[in-house]
Image (cartoon, helix red, strand yellow):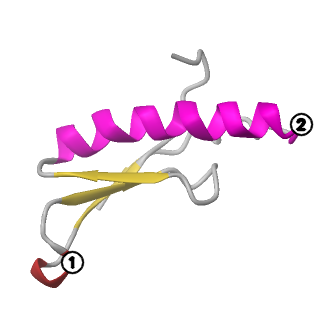
Amino acid sequence: MTQLTYPVIVSPLSAADGGGFAATVPDLPGCMSDGETPEEAIANVQDAIEMWLEAARDAGREIPPPSGVAAIA
């Protein structure tokens, strides 16, 4: 797991979208996951963060620093 800590926004998904919760990482464009509960969505997005960072490193892209702002919607 990375030592950087990125804020995550957790929001409920509509029944039309399958229900549960979405977790997005605003500092890392396109980095998101979901889960049945907010806790599951956060646990799942940790894997997505690691994969995003690994892909960025492999591509030689700059990794943005965490903004330090957290929100739950």
x, y percent for residue 33: 37, 51
Question: Does residue 6 appear anywhere in the picture?
Answer: no
Left or right position of 49 against 62: left
Mark toward the start of the polypeptide (2 vs 1): 1
x, y percent for residue 57: 79, 31
Marker disc for residue 41: none
68 or 8, which lies in front?
8
Few, some or many C-alpha atoms within 10 Å of disc 2 (few <14, some 14-19, many ≥20)?
A: few
> Three-letter amino acid code at disc 1?
Asp
Measured in 3D between alpha carbons, the distance from the residue under mark 2 to the one under mark 1, in whole angstroms, is 34 Å
Q: Which residues are magenta?
A: 38-61
x, y percent for residue 68: 58, 37
Residue bearing the label numbered 2: 60
- The secondary structure type at the circle numbered 1 is helix
> Three-letter amino acid code at disc 2?
Gly
Left or right position of 4 against 41: right
Residue bearing the label numbered 1: 17
Left or right position of 70 against 56: left
